[in-house]
Image (spheres, rainbow, N blue to C red):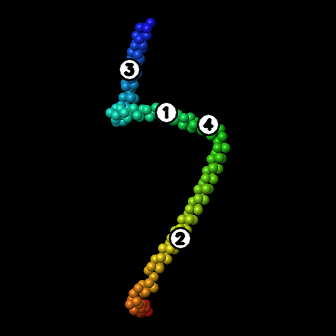
């Protein structure tokens, strides 16, 4: 009996190998697989087997979380159908309160921003008027006083004529 087990195991492995080769041949001869392999993506994956294996593993591993997500969507939809009025009322109430909080916050921010802009405008205009005031120009250049008086007299004479 000990000699029969290795031969039966060998025969089983050969049969399994034949079945797998037939399965692979059926995949390769499938019209959709042939069309995909003729596409640019199929040719690229055929030239890059590591990337193809990585993509296959990613798809296989991500099937479980995607399945759980779809299950959650179905259960949520059923719960929404059962309690649609309560759920809608809750969502509208929470959404309305959230909108109220956001609008109050935006109102506070706009008031603070307007105040900051207004104070900045007043400070900048005061500084500009202080820096470029005629008193400072006269104090810096006393001989310009006569020139300013002459120019003012010329303008008054032109204005009166």
State the residue at coordinates (39%, 18%).
17
Q: Are marks 3 and 2 in contact (CB under 8 Å)?
A: no
Is 84 left, or right, of 158 in this rendering? right
Percent across and percent down for residue 105 are 59, 59
With respect to residue 138, does 56 lie above or below?
A: above
Q: Is residue 75 left or right of residue 134?
A: right
- Extreme residue in the top direction: 1
Q: Which residue is mark 1?
A: 63
Residue 103: mark: none
Q: Residue at x 65, y 46 (%)?
A: 90
Q: CA distance from mark 3 to mark 2?
A: 81 Å
**Quadrant of the frame with the C terminus:** bottom left
Closest to the camera, between mark 3 and mark 4, is 3
Q: Secondary structure at mark 4?
A: helix
Q: Secondary structure at mark 3?
A: helix
Question: Mark 3, residues whose alpha carbon is within 10 Å: few (<14), some, or many (≥20)?
Answer: few
Q: Secondary structure at mark 2?
A: helix
- Residue 118's tag is 2
Q: Does 54 sit above or below residue 128?
A: above
Q: Position of residue 129 (x, y in %)?
A: 47, 79
Q: Is residue 112 visible in this depiction of the protein? A: yes
Precedes in sequence: disc 1 or disc 2: 1
Q: Is residue 3 above or below residue 110?
A: above
* Numbered circle sitting on residue 21: 3
In space, the residues marked 1 and 2 are separated at their CA atoms by 58 Å
Distance from disc 1 to disc 4, alpha carbons, whole Å, reads 22 Å
Residue in the image at 67% along x and 44% along y: 86
Q: Nearer the viewer, residue 71 or 127?
A: 127
Is the N terminus in the top left, top right, bottom left or bottom right quadrant? top left
Q: Which residue is mark 4?
A: 78
CA distance for labels 4 and 2: 55 Å
């Amino acid at each position: 009996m000990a000699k029969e087990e290795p031969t039966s195991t060998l025969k089983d492995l050969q049969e399994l190998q034949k079945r797998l080769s037939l399965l692979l041949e059926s995949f390769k001869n499938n019209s959709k697989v042939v069309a995909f392999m003729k596409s640019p993506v199929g040719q690229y994956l055929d030239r890059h087997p590591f990337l193809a294996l990585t993509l296959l593993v990613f798809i296989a591993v991500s099937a479980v979380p995607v399945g759980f997500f779809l299950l959650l969507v179905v259960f949520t939809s059923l719960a929404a159908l059962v309690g649609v009025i309560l759920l809608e009322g809750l969502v509208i109430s929470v959404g309305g309160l959230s909108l109220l909080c956001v609008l109050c916050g935006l109102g506070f921010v706009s008031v603070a921003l307007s105040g900051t802009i207004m104070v900045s405008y007043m400070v900048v205009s005061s500084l500009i008027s202080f820096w470029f005031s005629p008193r400072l120009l006269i104090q810096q250049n006393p001989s310009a006083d006569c020139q300013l008086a002459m120019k003012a007299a010329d303008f008054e004479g032109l204005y009166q004529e």
